[in-house]
């Protein structure tokens, strides 16, 4: 934020120094030609007007930076050209370098066409005293010398203006890039938070629900059937162990380390066994030719099955649930379907939202169908080519 004003201040300071150096050089030419007597009133007038010209060219030029209105520009360049012309007349043309800084400022602050007109005017008002005082024979030589000086100053100033404009564009691009980087960082943080939230809900949420069901079942039959209660508690203990293993798998997935992952069919069979242990009839059907899948695809489908079975146990009031895993040539599908009470509308909780986000991040789709009295069905389809898995041909 402070870099741009500091750069602007440095540019103004450099411009002031250049203006002062050229003005001093013009007066040194005057002294070298000994045009004026040290005690003449003309020398005093030239010095006074030179001071005014320098002050306006340095301090007064701030108005061009702060308020480059047409009126300000006309007043500034009119005053400088009048002062410079008067000094050149007083010095009988010896101070012919004096208006070069004004020509440079014309290139900076005026349009190209107007700046060329101002430079042409400077050439005329500078050459006029030389033609009158020194004679027309000197006009050609001095005229080409001044023209060359004006062209050099104009070209050098244009390069400086272009360089400053490029610096400003680069600074603006750098600022926008920093803003974009901050936005990307914020978005990445939000996505990572959502990912962690999905891991906690899909993993621990599933197992805690299953453990809660087993503990309730054990409490219900503890007095009448201690053996069944003990079996339910054993199942709850196994679920707690599985939950711990799932946490480890989630950490491994977050670290992008699929080395500890098991085949998808094996992990789905474990979920089916957990569902059977809760009293539901559950089965897994696999169609097509099983083959290795990208770890992120297997993990997403595992979470879909886990969320679907958890919802069946918690809400469906079903007696049977079926899982179907279909290996296609270009995609893989997983369906979870129950014979429960269903619903008139689909209530997308955080769990369904999480698995939908997982599948859509892999270019896949989630389809959910339900109706009152007709059960609940969730189907996930992930294209294997988009997710990095090449299709196999028979």
Image (cartoon, grey):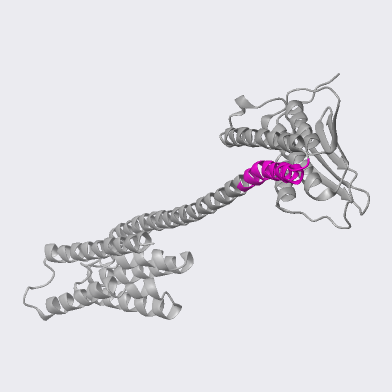
Q: Which residues are magenta?
A: 197-224
Percent coordinates x, y for residue 281 in the rendering: 86, 36
Q: Quadrant of the N terminus?
A: bottom left
Looking at this view, name the residue that lies furthest to the right: 373
Residue 209 drawn above or below residue 333: below
Residue 391 located left or right of residue 250: right
In this view of the protein, can residue 121 be seen by the observer? yes
Percent coordinates x, y for residue 51 in the rendering: 19, 75
Is residue 232 within the magenta segment? no
The answer to which of 158 and 328 lies nearer the viewer is 328
Q: Main secondary structure of the magenta part?
A: helix
The answer to which of 328 and 344 lies nearer the viewer is 344
Residue 181 located left or right of residue 273: left
Tell me which corner region of the image, top left, top right, bottom left or bottom right, holds residue 145. Answer: bottom left
**Total numbered labels:** 0
Tell me which corner region of the image, top left, top right, bottom left or bottom right, holds residue 306. Answer: top right
Percent coordinates x, y for residue 382 in the rendering: 78, 36
In this view of the protein, can residue 384 be seen by the observer? no
Percent coordinates x, y for residue 253 in the rendering: 61, 34
Looking at this view, name the residue that lies furthest to the left: 39
The answer to which of 389 and 77 lies nearer the viewer is 389
Q: Residue at x 74, y 28 (%)?
A: 264
Q: Quadrant of the C terminus?
A: top right
Q: Residue at x 61, y 25 (%)?
A: 259
Residue 182 located left or right of residue 344: left
Is residue 207 within the magenta segment? yes
Looking at this view, name the residue that lies furthest to the top: 394
Residue 171 drawn above or below residue 275: below
């Amino acid at each position: 934020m402070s870099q741009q004003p500091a750069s602007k201040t440095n540019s103004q300071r450099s411009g002031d120094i250049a203006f002062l150096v050229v003005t001093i050089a013009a007066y040194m030419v005057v002294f070298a030609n000994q045009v004026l007597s040290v005690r003449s009133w003309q020398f005093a007038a030239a010095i006074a007007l030179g001071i005014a010209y320098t002050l306006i060219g340095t301090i007064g030029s701030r108005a061009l930076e702060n308020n480059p209105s047409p009126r300000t520009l006309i007043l500034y360049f009119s005053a400088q050209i009048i002062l410079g012309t008067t000094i050149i007349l007083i010095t009988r043309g010896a101070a012919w370098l004096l208006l070069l800084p004004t020509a440079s400022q014309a290139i900076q602050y005026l349009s190209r066409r107007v700046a060329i007109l101002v430079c042409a005017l400077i050439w005329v008002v500078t050459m006029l005293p030389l033609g009158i005082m020194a004679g027309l024979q000197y006009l050609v030589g001095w005229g080409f010398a001044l023209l060359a000086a004006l062209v050099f100053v104009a070209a050098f100033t244009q390069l400086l203006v272009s360089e400053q404009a490029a610096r400003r564009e680069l600074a603006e691009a750098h600022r926008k890039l920093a803003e974009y980087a901050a936005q990307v960082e914020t978005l990445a943080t939000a996505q990572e938070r959502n990912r962690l939230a999905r891991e906690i809900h899909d993993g621990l949420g599933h197992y805690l629900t299953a453990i809660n069901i087993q503990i309730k079942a054990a409490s219900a039959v503890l007095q009448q059937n201690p053996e069944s209660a003990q079996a339910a508690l054993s199942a709850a203990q196994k679920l707690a162990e599985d939950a711990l293993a799932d946490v480890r798998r989630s950490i491994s997935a977050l670290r992008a380390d699929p080395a500890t992952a098991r085949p998808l069919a094996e992990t789905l069979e474990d979920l089916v066994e957990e569902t059977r242990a809760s009293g539901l009839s559950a089965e897994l059907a696999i169609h097509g030719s099983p083959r290795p899948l990208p770890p992120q695809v297997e993990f997403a489908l595992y979470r879909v099955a886990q969320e679907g079975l958890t919802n069946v146990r918690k809400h469906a009031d079903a007696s049977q649930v079926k899982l179907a895993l279909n290996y296609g040539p270009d995609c893989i599908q997983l369906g979870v379907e129950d014979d429960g009470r269903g619903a008139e509308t689909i209530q997308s909780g955080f769990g369904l939202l999480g698995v939908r986000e997982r599948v859509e991040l892999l270019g896949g789709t989630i389809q959910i169908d339900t109706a009152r009295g007709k059960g609940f069905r969730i189907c996930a389809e992930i294209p294997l080519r988009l997710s990095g898995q090449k299709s196999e041909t028979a």
